[in-house]
Image (cartoon, rainbow, N blue to C red):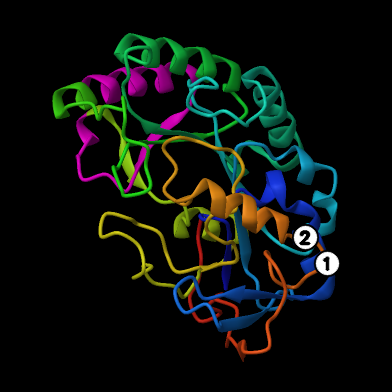
Amino acid sequence: MIISASRRTDIPAFYSEWFFNRIKAGFVLVRNPVQRQQVHRIDLSPDVVDAFVFWTKNPSPMMERLKLLKDYMYYFQYTLNAYGEDIEPNIPVRGMRLHKFKALSDMIGADRVIWRYDPIFFTDKYNMEYHIQSFERIAMILSGYTEKCTISFLDFCSSVQKEHLQLPSEEEQLILAKSFAEIGRRYGIQICTCAEKLCLQEFGIQKSSCIDKALLEKLLSCSLNVSKDKGQRSECGCVSSIDIGEYDTCNNGCRYCYACHSGQQIIANIRQYDSKSPLLIGNLNQNDIIKERKVKTLKDPQIGFKF
């Protein structure tokens, strides 16, 4: 089993205390995002958890306790964009996050810290020239501290604050991709895309995935018996995982976020947070129906593995 922590919220930044309490307890409870009375109990023992995949803009609260994950494999999807407080209002300053990126890479290895530069969009301030210059500045600093950068262009879903955010045209996307690929080659960083229809192979940019089977097999030195995640978009290349996060719980405040729909709901949820609860938000109710989710390791002893 692969655990996503999380597409729905920034667990390392805001809920690391809860996460490590769940590791200590050996299980977690996760509400169904749609049918809220349905709750799954998920075993978190090292025997069944093959890896954790973390999404974050700030891993600092988690870093000093990563030794508690010595029995697990894990890697980070670390977002570092070119935007300011007008777009990402509640995250630490970029200089601090760059410093933490390098410190995390030194701790666990450059192959386990994936730089995410996404989503890409334009405004009057954040135009093409701005993106190219900012991307190169970040790439120069992160050279040697990561092996891969994942890029994607903004998807306008119902929760995205669309005002003043512009999706680059296909021609503009191609210009950006070519520029990013050239920068990546200069600094030894492979550029990949996430859930993009546009083919950029002519620039040496391959389609990639957040829950990356090839990377996981390399890190685990074994083959995994796992298939594509049917719950994601058709362009998404991720393999199946279980997400332990909750929507409307991230306090980063990013204007482009698809996982937060209501500021009032976020405030209400955060007020219910209890780091000792088996649920990320709140506690069990009288009418909740708890079911044990059947999980197992995905490691396939029948298939040989070669680097």
Q: Position of residue 299 (x, y in %)?
A: 56, 75
Answer whether labels 2 and 1 touch (C-beta < 8 Å).
yes
Q: Is residue 72 above or below residue 176?
A: below
Residue 131: quadrant of the picture: top left
Q: Is residue 238 above or below residue 160?
A: below
Residue at 42% x, 10% y is 133
Q: Is residue 70 visible?
A: no
Say which amino acid is labelled 2: Trp
Q: Position of residue 295 (x, y in %)?
A: 58, 83
Q: Is residue 128 magenta?
A: no
Residue 191: quadrant of the picture: top left
State the extent of the magenta-drawn residues as a range: 175-202
Q: Nearer the viewer, residue 108 or 255?
A: 255
Q: Quadrant of the N terminus?
A: bottom right
Residue at 46% x, 60% y is 213
Mark pair 2, 1: CA separation: 6 Å
Residue at 65% x, 21% y is 93
Q: Quick check: 65 left or right of 30?
A: right
Residue assigned mark 2: 18
Residue assigned mark 1: 276
Within-10-Å neighbours for mark 2: few <14, some 14–19, many 20+: many
Say which amino acid is labelled 1: Lys
Q: Is residue 181 magenta?
A: yes
Q: Position of residue 47 (x, y in %)?
A: 71, 78
Q: Quick check: 161 left or right of 108?
A: left
Within-10-Å neighbours for mark 1: few <14, some 14–19, many 20+: some
Q: Secondary structure at mark 2?
A: helix
| Number of callouts | 2
Q: Position of residue 236 (x, y in %)?
A: 33, 55
Q: Is residue 107 above or below residue 268?
A: above
